[in-house]
Amino acid sequence: MSRMLLTLVLSPLLAGCHRATFEDSELRKSDVKYRVGPLSNDVWQRTGFEDNDLAFVERGDTGRVLATNSTCKDHDDPSLPVLTKHLLMGFTERQDLGQRTFTLDGREALRSRYVAKLDGVPVSLELVVVKKDNCVFDFSYVAPVGTAEARMADFDSLVSGFHAERQR
């Protein structure tokens, strides 16, 4: 999958422009700081897609992408299912493969799995949304259909290492 296609795939998933620093698996910006689980630099390369806090592409042009985002203003406190639907905007032929709630950083989170198309290209989507301290956090894993399981453990690690704190 080309970088241009990855940008198109990620664009609907990523909202809000942020200035942030990222070091030792911790992202800091003016209103929040949060930690994510570590990723192998041998496998994942941080990249700069617009409108997101963090994005990583798998080395070797496999088409797999991980992304995280946070929004602490102007989100009107929507439910977790509504937040998930916002992440799916722009995708067509969405097939819901299941959702489950779980606890993440002491809060209820929703994990969803979809197969969908963007501009006719089928992709697998693994999405997690959580709200904490008046902020919304989302995690996205996008992969070509049939290839997501190969790096699902990396997505799980990224999510399970999550811990957020509001900046005062």
Image: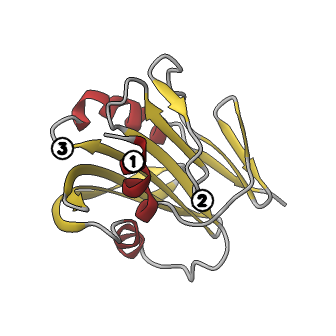
Which quadrant would residue 117 be assigned to in this image? bottom left
**Residue 114 bears which disc, if any?**
none
For marks 1 and 2, the one nearer the N-term is 1
**How many numbered marks, from 0 up?**
3
Residue at the spot of label 3: 145
Q: Nearer the viewer, mark 2 or mark 3?
A: 3
Which one is in front, 101 or 135?
135
Question: Residue 63 is drawn in which quadrant?
Answer: top left
Q: Nearer the viewer, residue 44 or 28?
A: 44
* Residue kind at label 1, given as amino acid type: Leu
| Mark 2: amino acid | Ser
Q: Residue at x 19, y 60 (%)?
A: 120
Provide the residue designation for mark 2: 70
Q: Residue at x 48, y 47 (%)?
A: 67
Q: Position of residue 168 (x, y in %)?
A: 84, 61
The amino acid type of the residue labelled 3 equals Val
| 10 Å crowding of disc 3: few (<14), some (14-19), many (20+) | some
Sequence-earlier tag: 3 or 1: 1
* Label drawn at residue 6: 1
Q: CA distance from mark 3 to mark 1?
A: 14 Å
Q: CA distance from mark 1 to mark 2?
A: 20 Å
Name the spot of residue 78 as percent of width and height, x first.
47, 79
